[in-house]
Structures are given as C-alpha cells and as structure tokens.
Image (cartoon, grey):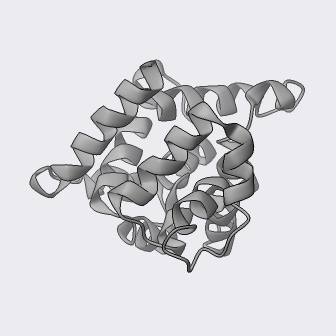
Amino acid sequence: MQVALYRLRQGLRALVAFARPVDEALAAQQLTPALLDRFRQMRRSEQQHSLRVLRALLDEGGVSPALATAALLHDVGKTCYPMSLWQRSLPVLVKAFSPAHLQRLSAGDPRSRWARGFVVYVYHPAWSAEIIAAGGGAADAVWLAAHHADDAGAWRDHPLHNDLKRLQYADDHE
C-alpha cells in the first residue's frame, strides 16, 4: 500500500512538473558538462525527482561526487525509450502483485508500445550505468547507478554498500 501511495504521489508530481522549476545550477555543481547534457535530456519530472534524491542525500551529510552523480543520473537510462505515464506506472503495479510476470514481460522489445514500460523498468539501471560511463563518470557512480534497483542485501560486502542503501532510500522516498 505504501508503494502505491508513493507512486500515486510520484505520478501527480509528474503531471505538474511543467509548473515547477528545475534547479539546473545544483546539477551543474555536481556533474561534468557531458553528464549535465545527459541530465538535460531527462524528462522534467525525472530531473526534479533526481534533484530531490540528491537534496535528501545532502541533507543527511557527506555525499561523495560519485554518489551525487548517481543520485542525479540513476534514471537517465529511461531516456533511451521515452514512456507515457501509463507505461511508467504499469510495471510498478505488476511487480507489486506478480514479480514473475514482470520478468516475463520485460523480455519484450522496448520499441513495442506494450512492452516498453516493462523493459525500461528492468533495464534502465544498466543503461544509466552505460550512459554515465560513456560520459566519463567515475566507476563508483557507474556501479551505484547499475545497482540502484537491486536488493542491497546482495551487496552487503561491497565497499559501496552503504552508499547504495542511501541512494535507494532517497530514491524510494523522493
């Protein structure tokens, strides 16, 4: 239920994103020019979400440049296949009720209007990591973006485990 309420709030934010400013100056402080260009390619609502994630991390204290980059670009892979609101929402609901169906549906072609949301939902972390790497992002930022949707417990022994947990918490709550 909590996930559904969060996603509803996220959807409403996306609908009114056009009326809210994007603090591009904050993003520019954290990103290289090449990565800032990729940030600018994200949907306005996704830029705002990423900035909220970064602000939540900054409010906690110490944020490495890699964590800041990952906060701002963890969803940049979604720019590979732009989606409508229903395409972004449906995979979240399917995952909540039947994770096995999500995996099956994500095996489709992202060019398909029906499959796109499922494919992007599952693969955008890897695509985000590739985009960050191609833009000269640090290896730690690449790793954090690649794993931001993973079960953090699987990475318990990884040196970036705490940063991953922080990123996931901020992502899930902003």
Is residue 76 among what the camera can see? yes
Q: Quadrant of residue 115?
A: bottom right
- In this view, the residue farthest toward the left is 19
Residue 174 can be seen, yes or no: no
Residue 87: x and y in percent read: 44, 59
Question: In the image, residue 54 lies at what x, y percent?
Answer: 43, 38
Residue drawn at 35 percent across, 38 percent down: 52
**Residue 134, relative to residue 156: is it above or below?**
below
Left/right of residue 66 with respect to residue 27 in the rendered view: right
Number of labels in the image equals: 0
| Farthest residue, direction right | 157
Relative to the observer, which residue lies in front, 133 or 91? 91
- Across and down, in percent, residue 4 comes to 41, 28
If the image is split into quadrants, where does the N terminus sit?
top left
Residue at point 50%, 68% (across, down): 35
Q: Residue at x 66, y 41 (%)?
A: 149
Residue 18 shown left or right of residue 164 in the figure: left
Residue nearer the viewer, 61 or 80: 80
Residue positioned 9% across, 53% down in the render = 19
- Image quadrant holding the C terminus, namely top left
Q: Position of residue 142 (x, y in %)?
A: 70, 56
